[in-house]
Amino acid sequence: MHQTDEFDDEGDDLGPSRSERRREALEVLELARRLVEQSEARLAQIPMDEDLRDLVLASRKITAQIARKRQIQFLAKHMRREDDEALGLIRAALDHDRADHRREAQALHEVEHWRDRLIAEGDEALAELLSAHPAADRQHLRQLARNAQQEKLKNKPPHAYRELFRELRELLSGAPEAD
């Protein structure tokens, strides 16, 4: 992880620069903050030794702002003592969660997009959806879209709107798109 190693006049390695050590320490501090924000169930899935897990759990219990900040700094100090491989595994587990979250959010946005298009554009959007997903129930989706449109116009509770969302989510998550 050392990008620029310094050498003295005889060519002896002096190690990482002070700036580099500071950047690494700040990265570990951010990693400690992210760990403390995780739920207990998620912490159980992250690979780390029990002492470190106990410190993370103890840090989560502290609610006073300045005390929590000090505790997270203390946690980061202990984490800096861990080898790079252990920190890499923790970082990879947390980054994997972020990627999963992004994919789930993207899928929900796609469902919302189709729902809004079906309500606004009607049969044109439905024909496009059916060309990508031929197994979909045309009549059911058309009826839900029309009912959702009527609910919106009459300021009624959004029952069909929600049902259309559920149907689209099931359709888009269950079947691969056909090109």
Image (cartoon, grey):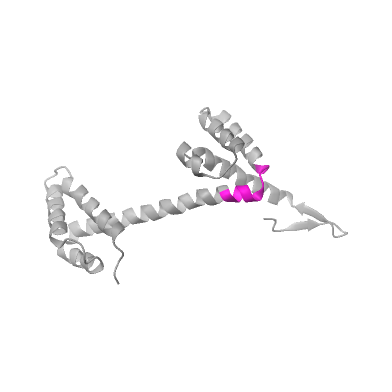
* Residue 146, position as x, y percentages in the image: 12, 55
* Residue 138, position as x, y percentages in the image: 15, 62
| Front-most of residues 26 and 169 | 169
Q: Quadrant of the N terminus?
A: bottom right
User: In the image, what residue occupies the spot 53% across and 41% down?
Assistant: 35
* Residue 103, position as x, y percentages in the image: 40, 55
| Residue sticking out furthest to the bottom | 179
Does the magenta portion include 130?
no
Q: How many marks?
A: 0
Q: Indicate left or right for 84 with 142 as reference.
A: right
User: In the image, what residue occupies the spot 87% across and 59% down?
Assistant: 9
Q: Indicate left or right for 147 with 14 as reference.
A: left
Compared with 66, 33 (above or below) is below
Q: Quadrant of the C terminus?
A: bottom left
Question: What span is in magenta?
Answer: 80-89
**Residue 68 image-quadrant placement:** top right
Compared with 133, 146 (above or below) is above
| Front-most of residues 92 and 14 | 92
| Front-most of residues 7 and 57 | 57
Q: Indicate left or right for 93 with 175 as reference.
A: right
* Residue 99, position as x, y percentages in the image: 45, 54
**Residue 177 image-quadrant placement:** bottom left
| Front-most of residues 148 and 100 | 100
User: In the image, what residue occupies the spot 41% across and 53% down?
Assistant: 102
Compared with 177, 46 (above or below) is above
Does the magenta portion include 87?
yes
User: In the image, what residue occupies the spot 23% across and 64% down?
Assistant: 129
Q: Tell me the chief SS of the magenta region.
A: helix
**Residue 155 image-quadrant placement:** top left
